[in-house]
Amino acid sequence: MSEVEIGFTLNGAPVQGRAEPRTHLADFIREEMLQTGTHLGCEQGVCGACTVFIDGRPARSCITLAASCQGADVRTVEGFDDDALMRRIREAFSRHHALQCGYCTPGMLTTAYDIVRRLPDADARRIRRELAGNLCRCTGYAGIVSAIEDVLANDPPTAGLAAMPRSVPVAGPAASPALSEPGITAAAGSHDPGALPDAASLKGAAHLTRSLTLSVGAGEAWALLSAPERIVTCVPGAGLTGPVEGGKLAGQILVAVGPIKATFAGRGAVTFDAGRRRGGLVGRGRDALSRTALEGMLDFVVAETGPGTCRLDLDMRYRLAGPLAQFGRPELVAEIADRLLAEVAAAIEREVRGDGISVAEAPKPIKGFALMVQALKAMLSRIFSGR
């Protein structure tokens, strides 16, 4: 099924992306926009865990098609971080012990917000009736009702989302200039084949810095790093799919996580400053099967540390969006990166010595499952050892 362009306002910022016409809003928000505060429960519009605001009114995002929200104003629980009314509701929920496991809480908070702004005179009976569409298996609802009563009884609010317009004129796919503003997740959702991420589009993305100690001279390391066709053979799972021309390149990264296999095919650009032995790589790719998008940028510098040794400093920013984003948690990525970079460092040293792999040899996929097992073991070891 072919994908369609989708553009709307999410938590005050214009977003744009592509999805199949059958994609529900909840899936689009969580997997493409990485706003995971919206929870999925029954996926039939019954439990209310996925409740969000669409044009100022509560709606079930699990049964609302993302394509139907073209030009709408969508607000999830993340969109109320600085909202005074929602802050009072959250405090009341905490004060009255209105949550336990927390799974229903995003939908409960959203519904409570609607009740408070729409029904300032609601009593306990009316509140219970309004909450009938939100299921909670933990609290017995008493604390939730008391929390809402508390907010209504103490200076009932008149501002907040009540002033939100019922319909917001947001342009659709043509409104792409707004996506270049800092903080907007443009590259992960727009899939514009002519655009590459930059510092502005990656603002707020995951950030990782690492240093590698190499048993090769700085000049030898730089000669390898500044030759894309050579350095790509040192990165597990990576390969070029065409010649490098004018700093532009096309390539792919193969990843295998147990039975899950993904091939991120995409484009990138490289820059080099030979005088300072500095360089940069920016790129974006997409796995067609899982519809997971990956984008990022890498800055690197080679520093001489002694005869026959050097240090490679890396500064990485990346964003993963889609079903495989669950493997993109910063802590897990950091652990995996340490093990992957150890392999890269060893491969660089072998390549400089002349016993690396052939450029023509097919890249072997990154063994994500083995790396994750090692990473989880290391994380648990640190936790239980108190380090």
Image: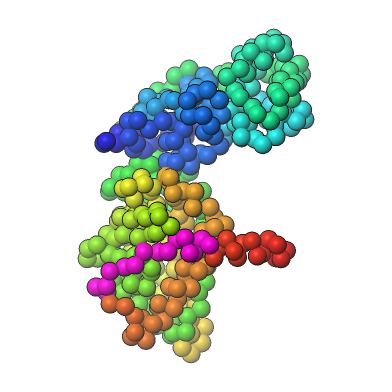
Residue at x-position 53% and y-position 32%:
41
Q: Residue furthest bottom?
A: 307
- Asked if one can make out residue 82 in the rendered structure from this viewpoint, the answer is no
Quadrant assignment for the C terminus:
bottom right
Looking at the image, is 173 positioned above or below residue 242?
Answer: above
Residue at x-position 34% and y-position 38%:
18
Please give left or right for residue 259 compared with residue 47 in the image: left
> In the rendered structure, which segment of residues is drawn in magenta?
359-373
- x and y, in percent, of residue 92 in the image: 74, 27
- Asked if one can make out residue 289 in the rendered structure from this viewpoint, the answer is yes
- x and y, in percent, of residue 1 in the image: 27, 36
Q: Quadrant of residue 271?
A: bottom left
- x and y, in percent, of residue 343 in the image: 45, 73
Looking at the image, is 237 positioned above or below residue 44?
Answer: below
Residue at x-position 68% and y-position 61%:
383
Q: Give the number of marks.
A: 0
- x and y, in percent, of residue 273 in the image: 37, 71
Residue at x-position 43% and y-position 85%:
217
Instruction: Give whichever of 376, 10 is nearer the camera.
Output: 376
Q: Is residue 360 magenta?
A: yes
Please give left or right for residue 44 compared with residue 235 in the image: right
Q: Is residue 343 magenta?
A: no
Q: How is the image coloured?
A: rainbow
